[in-house]
Amino acid sequence: MKEKKRTGLVVFLLIAAICIALIPFFALRGAAFGGSDDAGSEVVAEVNKGYEPWFTPILETAIGGELPGEVESLFFCVQTGIGVGIMAYCMGRLVERKKLGKEDQDL
């Protein structure tokens, strides 16, 4: 019974995730989906026209310019993968700890 309840919840969450990913494409047809960095830079330029960035990314300083968009995307994906890996590891450890705790109580 409890297993069936979890399966229903998982299916519901998967459907909700798919809807969250797809609805903007159909609801906002023709909209330009861009990065938040560029949008933030435009807003800062509108608010304070004399703004000078106080920090330059270390990698851009090292190579003497901006990274190509594909490399930025690669770094973003790598960061995401590392973060997801860390979260999955921690969640797995917590689940195993809970299972082992129940087994110790059963003995």
Image: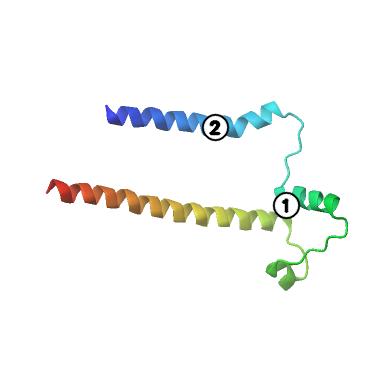
Picture coordinates of residue 101 (x, y %)? 22, 50
Compared with 64, 16 (above or below) is above
Ranked by sequence position, the earlier of labels 2 and 1 is: 2
Q: CA distance from mark 2 to mark 1?
A: 25 Å
Q: Name the residue carrying label 2.
A: 18
Residue 63 in which image quadrant: bottom right
The structure residue drawn at horizontal position 66% and vertical position 31%, both measured from the top left corner, is 24
Q: Residue furthest front?
A: 47
Quick one: 12 or 73, which is closer to the camera? Answer: 12
Picture coordinates of residue 38 (x, y %)? 76, 50
Snapshot colouring:
rainbow
Number of numbered markers: 2
Q: Is residue 56 left or right of residue 81?
A: right
Quick one: 45 or 18, which is closer to the camera? Answer: 45
Picture coordinates of residue 29 (x, y %)? 74, 28
Q: Amino acid at mark 1?
A: Asp
Name the secondary structure under disc 1: helix
The structure residue drawn at horizontal position 78% and vertical position 63%, both measured from the top left corner, is 53
Name the secondary structure under disc 2: helix
Q: Amino acid at mark 2?
A: Ile
Q: Name the residue carrying label 1.
A: 37
Q: Is residue 66 left or right of residue 10?
A: right
Q: Nearer the viewer, mark 2 or mark 1?
A: 1
